[in-house]
Image (tube, rainbow, N blue to C red):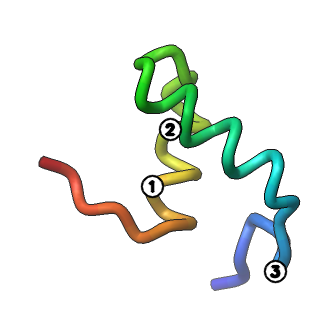
Amino acid sequence: MTKRYPEWVNTQVVVKAIKMKEKGILSKQLNLWIENLLEIEKK
């Protein structure tokens, strides 16, 4: 299966997504993307 996201990501975008995730305002799809990208385990 091929990856559906780029091999590289912009650091500013990732940092902003992490901050939005911490505030709980990240969309469900982007939340799943950042968790997958950073290999975050669900609690």
Camera-nearest residue between 30 and 9: 9
19 left or right, relative to 41: right
- Residue underneath mark 3: 7
Q: Amino acid at mark 2?
A: Asn
With respect to residue 34, does 27 lie above or below? above
The answer to whether 36 appears left or right of 17 in the picture is left
Residue at image point 48% right, 31% down: 21
- Of the image marks 1 and 3, the number of the one nearer the N terminus: 3
Q: Earlier in the sequence, mark 2 or mark 3?
A: 3
Say the numbered circle drawn on residue 13. none
Element carrying mark 3: loop
Q: CA distance from mark 1 to mark 3?
A: 15 Å
Q: Are marks 2 and 1 in contact (CB under 8 Å)?
A: yes
Query: What's the residue at 56%, 22% (across, down)?
Result: 27
Picture coordinates of residue 15, whole percent (x, y): 67, 47
Q: For residue 19, which quarter of the picture?
A: top right
Residue matched to label 2: 31
Where residue 36 appears, as percent x and y from the top left, is 48, 63
Residue 40 locus on image (x, y percent): 35, 62
What residue lies at 21% left-to-right and 51% top-to-bottom? Answer: 42
> The N terminus is located in which quarter?
bottom right
Residue 10 x, y percent position in the rendering = 87, 60
Q: Which residue is mark 1?
A: 35
Given the image, on which type of amino acid does mark 3 rest?
Glu
Give the class, few, some or many, for how many residues have Cα within 10 Å of label 1's Cα (few <14, many ≥20).
some
Neighbour tally class for label 2: few under 14, some 14-19, many 20 plus, Cα within 10 Å: some
Secondary structure category for the residue under label 2: helix
